[in-house]
Structures are given as structure tokens and as C-alpha cells.
Amino acid sequence: MQGESLYVSVHIAYYDKNHVLGFVRNISDIENERIRNERSNFFLKSLLDNLPIATIVKDINDRGKYLVWNKKAAEMVNTDASHIIGKREEDFIGKERTDFLVEAEREVIENGKPKSFVKRFTNRDGQTKILSIHKALVCFPKGNERWLVSSSLDITELEMQRKQIELMNRHYMFVMQAIGLISWTWDLRKDEITCNRSYFTPKTHAATGTVIEKGDDYYSQIIPEHRERIRQAFDNLKNGTPSPFNEEYQIIYEGDDVPSWAETFAIVSERDRNGKPLVLVGATRLIDERKKLDQELLHAKERAEEANRLKSAFLANMSHEIRTPLNAIVGFSALLADTHPNEESKEYVHIIESNNQLLLQLINDILDISKIESGTLEFVYGDMDVNGSFNEIESATRLKLDLGPNVEIRFLPALDECMLYTEKNRVLQVINNYISNAIKYTSSGYIHFGYYPPKEDKIRFFVRDTGSGIPKEKQQQIFGRFIKLDNFKQGTGLGLSICSMIAEKMDGHVGVSSEVGKGSEFWFEIPCQPVLPPQQEVEEQKKRATEYQQS
């Protein structure tokens, strides 16, 4: 009647045919206590089941009966709690426990002191895990009740990571020792640099081991000509500049009296909430030996380049001295043929003239290479009528060389008219070299040469033949010096190398496509500037003038 909710216990008993007896008792306190206990038990069970740690509780007073076997324990051992709770150790037939665990539990029960250890464990599925186990004894203060609480944490992955970190640390220490690396940490809040010089070899009496110094002390050891540059580089890093820190400088460590060359790498290791650097980490290694080798290599390179320049200059300067007597030999051999008209003398003179030409070609090739290397080969640009020049090559080759009836030489023009602003002499030199090379290896068929229509301000010249062809694996070698695929053919092996060098000097390149037994196509591609016909050039000038006025 007062609006209170009560828990009551009602008992109805028979009294007689017309009456029953009703016994009603207020059990609210008892029921509320039961509900509180039920909630506490539910909370405790939920808490234990959701822990990432396997938890087991045994009742010591009841011969080790299992009271708690949480969800994580069931997963770890692969045994459900329903098969464990309420049972004792001896209830599990065939269940074997190691003497170590039995002894550990006995010590905890007898001494009442917790015990922790790491143990390797294999469950029923054969999975091996590494567990961190903790055992403790819990006693009820108002009675003799005692419980053994065991908790196990699966640290298999952590243990693997720990071993990997140990391995990496060993590697790191080995590398530091191998190269004499100095690792350091710079706490910018304290302006304190902590250096690990365990593997540092001082020049005289510099400190080793762990060395702590201030930033200004570090800067003062750097020689003056490098000091401000290094200070500025560190300031950039401290101010958040993303560029990597990698500097070389000279430093005289405190205690040493001889400077050392050092190379330092550094990054930002820790920042505050606003992104301001708080800690720098880095490493320094001494590079005296490398600097010494670099200097020696530089001197050796300079000496080699000087020797090469002297050689090239010598050969280039010998042009007149070599060609003068050679021209005399060529001229008098031709005169000798006229003064001795008999067949035997003509044959001898022909042999002399052929070898004169080979010798002259060899000397010209060597001199051209020397001039290119020494920078004395002239490149004079001007207008070039490609069709006219190539027609002259075709006629001259027919007159000069006896190709025989089985070989046709022919110029293939791609345009009716092709006027370019280029280096005419070098273009003709490359084409003539290609044609001479094709003649040596073509006994029948044809030798065609020409050009493709200019495209994207470039023009490609070609010489195509039906000669013996070149194996694919040797096609990149043939532009090297003194490379001859057939040692029985006449020639120096320098012609194609000269073509390649001329192309490079003209910002172009050379190449070849070939198939053994079918022939080859050598090409020469360079930048080009078309020359407009007079009327067209006038129109272009008017167009440019109009565009200028409009702009």
C-alpha cells in the first residue's frame, strides 16, 4: 500500500475442506542480495572472458578443482570450459603435466609468493606457442579458503619480433664496427649531443665510448672553412626543411691534433605537436681513405686526359708531315705507270696504288679520330642540296670502283627537293664510309642509299645492301674501334667508329638493322633545319612580320 516493491515467499497448506493456511514472508533483503551476487558473477565472468589473457582458477581446499577457465584459456589450449570447470587434475585421463609446472605450483602454494616465467607450450592441435605465465595464491582473509590463480599471455609474436630486433641490432653493431660508424642523438631541448664512439679510432687522444657534448662544442671542432656550411645545414634541418642532411667536412676531434674527413647523415626523430623538431638522430663516419683515393683517382684521371690530349694533338699535328710524303708516293706511282707501259709494270703499279689508298685511308681515319678527340675537327655548317650531293656520290662511286655487273648502286631520293642547313662534309663522310663498308661485304644484289623524309626536326640517312649481314649479338660491337667481323676483308676497323663519333658531335646517333644472309641497313640520324626556297622564304618573312605587328 506504500508503493514499495517486495519479494515475498508464499507457502499454501491444507487446513480443512473449507480452509487453507497461507504463510507469507518478506524475503526482499535475501533476494536483492542474490541478484547483486548474480550480477557480480555475471560481470566477473564477462570480464574474465573478454580479457586477452588466459586465466585459470583452482580451489586448493577442494583438491585443485577448476573454478574458472576463461574464453582465452579455452582458445589457447583448444579445450572448452565445459570440459574443465568442476573437475580436478586427476580427472583428465592421459593428461600429462611437466614437472616444472607441478613444482612451480607447489612453490607458490607453500610459500604464498607469486611466480612468473616464460614457457614454450604445444596445444592439442600441435601449435607451439610461447607463453608468459604468472601464478599467484589468493586467500580469503576470514577463513581458510585458498585459490591458485594462473594467467598466461601469448607472447609468440612479441618473442619473434624481439629476436628479429636482436638480429637487426647485431647486424647494426657489426656494420658500425666494420665501418667505424659514430651514432649520435641530439636532444634540441637540452642542446645535448650523445655520441656512441665505441668503434671510433682516434687520430691521437680523442675520447672513445659514450661522449656527451653541447652543440657549440661540436661546431668548434669543425675546421673554419666548413663550419658555417655545416651550421647552416643543421639549422635548415631544425627549421623543418625536408631536404636530407648528408654533408662532408673536416673536423679535429677534441684530443686529436690531426683533422679527419667526416661524412654525416641526420634526420628528425621526434617532433612536438606543432611539428617542431625536438630530437635529431644521425651517424658520422670517417672517410679519410676515401678522400685519399678520390684525390689519387682525380690526379690519375687528369694525367690520363692530359696524355690523351697530347697524343691526339701530336697525331693531329702530324697530318701535314705524313700526307706530304704519302702524296709524293701516290703521285710518282701513277707517273711510273705512264713511263712503264708494259703489263707487268702496270700490275706492280696497280698493287702499289691499291696499297697507297689503303695506307692513306688508315692515316686519314687515325687523324680524324685524333682530331675529334682533341676537338680540332672542323664542323662548318651551311646549306646542303641533299639530292644533288647524293647524285654526285652515286656517279663518283660508279666511276671510282669496279662493282661488277652483279651489284647495283643507286640513290633513292625521298623528296623531289631536300635543302638542309647542316654540316655537309661530315654527312657525306658518314655516307661514303657506309657505302665503302657495304661494297666490301656485297658480292651480288644492290647497294641503295638515301634518306627518309624529315620528321620532328630530324632526318635519317641510310645505306641499305644485300650483303652477308651481321649476327644480332655483334651488331652493337661494330661501332667500336678496330672491330672487324671478317679479318680477311681490307680495312682498318675505324670507319664505323668515326661515323659514330661524328654523329655524337652533331647531336645525333647511328645504328644498324641486319639479318645474316639477307643484308643490312646502316642509318645516321641528326637534327636538321630545312632551308626554304627563296619565294617561300619571302612568304615566311612576311608572315612573321605580320604576326609581330599584331602582337
Image (cartoon, rainbow, N blue to C red):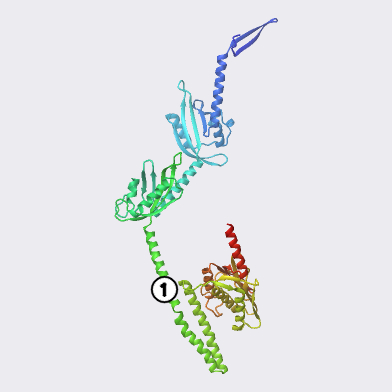
From this viewpoint, is residue 454 visible?
no
Which residue is at 49% across, 25% downward? 61
The image position of residue 11, as x and y in percent, is: 63, 11
Residue nearest the viewer, comparing 292 with 148: 292
Task: Kindly identify which residue carries mark 1.
Answer: 310
The quadrant of the rendering that contains the C terminus is: bottom right
Which residue is at 41% across, 43% downward? 279
Q: Secondary structure at mark 1?
A: helix
**Residue farthest to the front, as pictured:** 549
Which residue is at 56% across, 90% downward? 347
The type of residue carrying mark 1 is Leu
In this view, 544 is above or below 140? below
The image position of residue 63, as x and y in percent, is: 51, 27
In this view, 318 is above or below 264? below
Which residue is at 58% across, 40% downward? 125
From this viewpoint, is residue 9 visible?
yes
Image quadrant assignment for residue 9: top right
